[in-house]
Amino acid sequence: MSVHLAAKKGEIAPVVLMPGDPLRAKFIAENNLENIRLVNSVRNIFFYTGTYKDTTITIGASGMGCPSIGIYSYELYNEFDVECIMRIGTCGAYLDSIPLYTVINTETAYSESTYAGTAFNYREDYFQHQGNAFDIINQTAAALNIPVLSGSIHSGDAFYRVDREMPALAKQNKCLAAEMEAFALFANAKYFNKTAAAILTVSDNIITHQVISTEERERSLTTMTQLALEAACRIHEAL
Ligand code: HPA
């Protein structure tokens, strides 16, 4: 048990898939894992552990924003011997040329967030993905014929902001899309010398204002989910 997770040590797998939404964690676990067990429900932040093709995997929610994913990923790395956390989330594209449903494998996360400075005195405004998960995701995507875009993204602290269409940091660094969590996850993984990746599906386009409807959202995440589960098996095998 940790401050925010009631799971016992050993109830969480070495590889964790982490959507933002607890109900998405439930949906993905119920539809893809066998022998699932709910191992945390504190604050309704559901974590399920089960097996996918004989590999034990945990799927648990991060909540929204750097402070929230910062807490859960810190405790997973520090207290549950988790080796790899793969965020599976949605993002808003900054370029009108990036269609809805595009899957992005995050190379670098830029942010104005004070999270990493506050937590670790890290002064960088960007962190790379950590460890081998990024490469394994790209290899898995190629094997499954899933088109994936790799590049930089922007982890913003505010979803609603006056400069939503052109935040300076995102523009300077040619960020493909906005989301709100990868930066803190990558900073934590760097601090603990662990593995972290973020696979993102484009759910809205910030420039054209196109959005995936609520009904389409579930379906839209199946490609990313398949990619994450298959990559998780390979990451587990390589541990
Ligand atoms: N901005 C920030 N986070 C997001 C977005 C967005 O447009 N879409 C999905 N997550």
Image (spheres, rainbow, N blue to C red):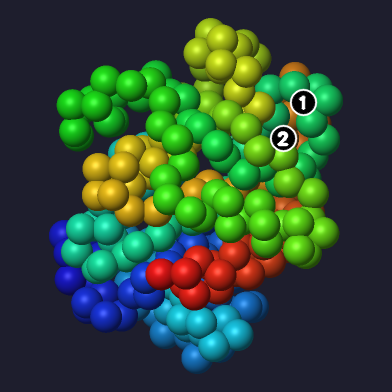
* The quadrant where residue 104 appears: top right
- Eyeballing the image, is 217 above or below 29? above
Does mark 2's beta carbon lie closer than 8 Å to ligand 1?
A: yes
Q: Which amino acid type is marked by label 2?
A: Asp
Q: Which residue is drawn at 28% across and 61% down?
A: 76
Please, what secondary structure does the residue beneath circle 2 have? strand
Under circle 1, the secondary element is: loop
Q: In the image, is residue 104 above or below residue 152?
A: below
Position of 9 with respect to 166 (left or right) is left
In the picture, measured across the screen, residue 22 lies left or right of residue 4, that is right
Q: What quarter of the picture does the N terminus occupy?
A: bottom left
Name the residue tied to disc 2.
204
**Where is residue 105 shown, x and y percent of the image?**
62, 44
Q: Residues within 10 Å of mark 1 (few under 14, many from 20)?
A: few
Residue in view at x 33 percent, y 53 percent? 194
Report the disc number at residue 73.
Answer: none
Closer to us: 18 or 158: 18
Residue 30 in the image, given as x and y percentages of width and height: 58, 79
Q: Which of marks 1 and 2 is nearer the N terminus?
A: 2
- Residues at circles 1 and 2 in contact by the CB criterion of under 8 Å: yes
Q: Nearer the viewer, residue 69 or 231?
A: 231
Q: Mark 1 points at which residue?
A: 209
**From what the image shows, is residue 102 above or below residue 23?**
above
Q: Which amino acid does label 1 sit on?
A: His
In which image quadrant can residue 95 be found?
A: top right
The quarter holding residue 216 reads bottom right
Rendered position, 34 above or below 46: below
Measuring from the top left, give residue 184's x and y in whole percent: 36, 38
Residue at the location (41% across, 26% down)?
A: 126
